[in-house]
């Protein structure tokens, strides 16, 4: 049996793509609009309410949009690191903390925790994401820092994914920090020759990631990881130019990576390469805010034609944020994105980064009925109120997965 | 009968005051700590659990702090103005919108709404504040823009206050925008000769406020309002140096105002005057964020010895934020306050601004049992997670006024 909602506004990206210029897919705005789906949770209709073949629930003064896709998180992890945040406010730099320190600390906490303890810590965070409208997200390793511990974290990610109502994509962050007592080249070799093939053989991961930075891994390491990922048939992602310009964005684009993430210090050449290539620019405004870092050159990335996506970067070190509405709000306020640009970046483009487009991130016939009911009569109400959850209902695969007390 | 809670941490300002330097009252941190209160809701004990005379509820891994005091809001209002936020992202300046435009629009919406419609709009916002730990707040007029409509808004504020569990202080923002069809001097005269005396005679307000700005009112207007407020026995507050330096902070300090608010463009002389005088500097980081404005010189204000308070500025034009944890988070990230400085600014100092110290804003024997139970074992968890509500329970006058599903 088909089901349908109709609301004062239905807004959706027309698909992934650049946010500005003649090639931008833009946003479809129906005022009023309606969405219908079949019993399999596949959308059958998006259009004006009068074109519906079935009776719809009417949502007065509400906006229906695709569910948010959080395309960069560091879940599963266990334990917070609020004291590091406080130390940074007192003058310690993240560079001081990042050279293994904070990441190694999360690795120690992960090692000390049982599987159930890790899952118990993560479940409320996925529930919080659901209550903030996230219907698909990335999970990532990178707090293992040994072949076995990375594989364990990937298995925990798959367990979390199997329980969660959201669609989860798992990324192997094979090179995040150099493990204690190991030299960098040895770890890169282990990651490429043992970890990546083992994770791929066990079907544990959907992509491979690497942090290129002077306190982490080099461009040569990126190339080695890219080759191992390609051999395993896995797409590549890259933490690029977060603390300083390293040429990582250019290299990621040249390697055909799915994304280059952070980009606070991306060079002009990096901007041009992302604009010319197919590598998405994943931006994480709450990470920028909490690190008190310079924002990436967002206007230049958009003008160059880069596919820009937004994410929370949910992690205990630099961005303990589970809310995509908060990422959208800070993305507009700090980066100057328009609400509709932020909508595309937080849904269709993020789904593209995770390899989930076009089934996710867009409301269109044939796509999955993953959607949110939002306060207000336009998407602009999402970035307008930082610190506030504008999501009233989260629907996944056509079923109500979460609803605020009192409902719509 | 006495009641008590004990927790991994109890943190409280020792009182209002400057945040840095030898004169700063500082923060009392008990690890673990306990708070007890009598049946009147008055605190009888703050200290280590072993000193308690009664049995306490033990809150493992939690932090108990004073309830937040939101010392600058524009409630009651009715209707959002998210389209103005979107227009600013597209390049319109607030100066363009502020010269009566946005404020006059809120005045039209207020005029068009019945009393019940206004209260129905505001009630969920006060409930949201409660769920974010606000136990005392300011309500303000300024969307009336006629003597009668200002008095109506003050009466609505008093009605809202009488219903709300929070302690509410009402400020008459007598000069907010020049009403349409009236010249500025005529309105200032009406405000001083009719509005302020009438509001005072009816006991409707606890303070008087004025916006000094080239698009609003002049320093001479401030002096006139100050004289009228003094005649009425009401303390003075001032929206100062928000869009450009006008000398308002210096003038407010010279007039002995309770506070100078915003201060994004305060001059060196203004900083010095606030440091030397008794006028508090009220800062509103979410307003700065959403206006994409330069931050005030926070370090200089602190170094000068100013009493700094934080507030949400909750209003439909520039800061539709109800969450003090969000104001604290943005205050740390954007202004570089330490978590403990933000704690003092958001509790004891804010209570001082509202004339509510020392009964509010500090946990100490004799003070009111207005407190919050927070996630985590230290106050630093509040600014660490923007977009997240860290409050588990809000206690007002010793009674649980709000608790998260699942409790502590």
Image (cartoon, coloured by chain):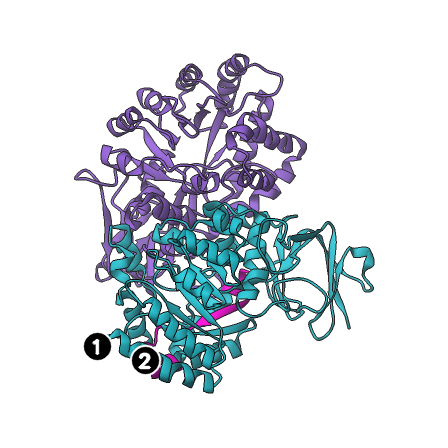
Chain colours: A cyan, B purple
Q: Tell me the magenta residue range.
A: A129-152
The answer to whether dots 2 and 1 both sit on one chain is yes
The residue lying furthest to the left in this view is B22
C-alpha separation, residue under disc 2 versus residue under disc 1: 15 Å
Residue A193: x %, y % from top left? 36, 83
SS for dot 1: loop
Judging depth in this view, the residue of B61 and A216 nearest the camera is: A216
Neighbourhood count class around disc 1 (C-alpha, 10 Å): few under 14, some 14–19, many 20 upward? few
SS for dot 2: helix
Q: Quadrant of the C terminus of chain A?
A: bottom right
Is B261 rendered above or below residue A81?
A: above
* Residue at position x 26%, y 64% in the image: A99
The quadrant holding residue A350 is bottom right
Residue under pointer 1: A181
Residue B328: x %, y % from top left? 38, 47
Neighbourhood count class around disc 2 (C-alpha, 10 Å): few under 14, some 14–19, many 20 upward? some
* Residue at position x 54%, y 12% in the image: B186
Residue under pointer 2: A189
Chain letter behind tag 1: A
Residue B332: x %, y % from top left? 34, 47
Residue A213 shown left or right of residue A234 in the figure: left
Q: Earlier in the sequence, mark 2 or mark 1?
A: 1
Residue B55: x %, y % from top left? 30, 63
Chain letter behind tag 2: A
Q: Which mark is residue B17?
A: none
The quadrant holding residue A55 is bottom right
**A148 falls in the magenta region:** yes
Judging depth in this view, the residue of A45 and A114 nearest the camera is: A45
């Amino acid at each position: 049996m088909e089901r349908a909602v109709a609301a004062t506004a239905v807004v959706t990206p027309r698909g992934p793509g650049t946010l500005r210029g003649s090639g931008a897919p833009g946003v479809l705005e129906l005022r009023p609009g309606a969405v219908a789906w079949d019993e399999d949770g596949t959308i059958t209709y998006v259009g004006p309410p009068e074109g519906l073949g079935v009776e719809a629930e009417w949502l007065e003064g509400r906006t229906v949009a695709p569910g948010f896709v959080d395309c960069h998180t560091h879940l599963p992890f266990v334990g917070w690191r609020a004291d590091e945040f406080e130390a940074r406010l007192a003058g310690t730099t993240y560079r001081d903390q990042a050279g293994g320190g904070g990441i190694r600390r999360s690795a120690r906490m992960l090692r000390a925790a049982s599987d159930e303890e890790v899952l118990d810590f993560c479940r409320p965070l996925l529930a919080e994401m659901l209550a903030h409208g996230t219907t698909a997200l990335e999970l990532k390793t990178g707090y293992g820092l040994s072949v076995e511990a990375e594989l364990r974290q990937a298995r925990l990610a798959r367990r979390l994914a199997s329980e969660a109502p959201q669609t989860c994509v798992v990324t192997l962050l094979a090179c995040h920090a150099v493990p204690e007592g190991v030299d960098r080249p040895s770890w890169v070799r282990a990651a490429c020759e043992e970890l990546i093939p083992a994770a791929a053989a066990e079907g544990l991961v959907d992509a491979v990631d690497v942090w290129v930075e002077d306190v982490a891994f080099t461009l040569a390491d990126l190339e080695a990881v890219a080759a191992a990922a390609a051999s395993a048939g896995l797409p590549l992602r890259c933490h690029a130019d977060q603390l300083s310009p390293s040429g990582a964005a250019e290299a990621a684009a040249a390697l055909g990576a799915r994304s280059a993430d952070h980009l606070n210090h991306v060079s002009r050449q990096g901007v041009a390469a992302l604009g010319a290539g197919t590598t998405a620019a994943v931006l994480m405004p709450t990470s920028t805010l909490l690190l008190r870092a310079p924002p990436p050159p967002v206007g230049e990335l958009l003008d160059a034609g880069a596919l820009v996506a937004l994410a929370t970067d949910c992690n205990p070190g630099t961005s303990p944020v589970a809310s995509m509405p908060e990422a959208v709000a800070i993305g507009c306020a700090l980066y100057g994105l328009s609400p509709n640009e932020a909508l595309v970046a937080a849904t269709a483009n993020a789904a593209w980064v995770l390899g989930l487009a076009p089934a996710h991130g867009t409301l269109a016939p044939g796509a999955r009925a993953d959607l949110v009911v939002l306060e207000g009569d336009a998407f602009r109400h999402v970035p307008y109120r930082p610190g506030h959850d504008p999501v009233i209902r989260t629907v996944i695969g056509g079923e109500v997965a979460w609803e605020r007390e009192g409902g719509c």
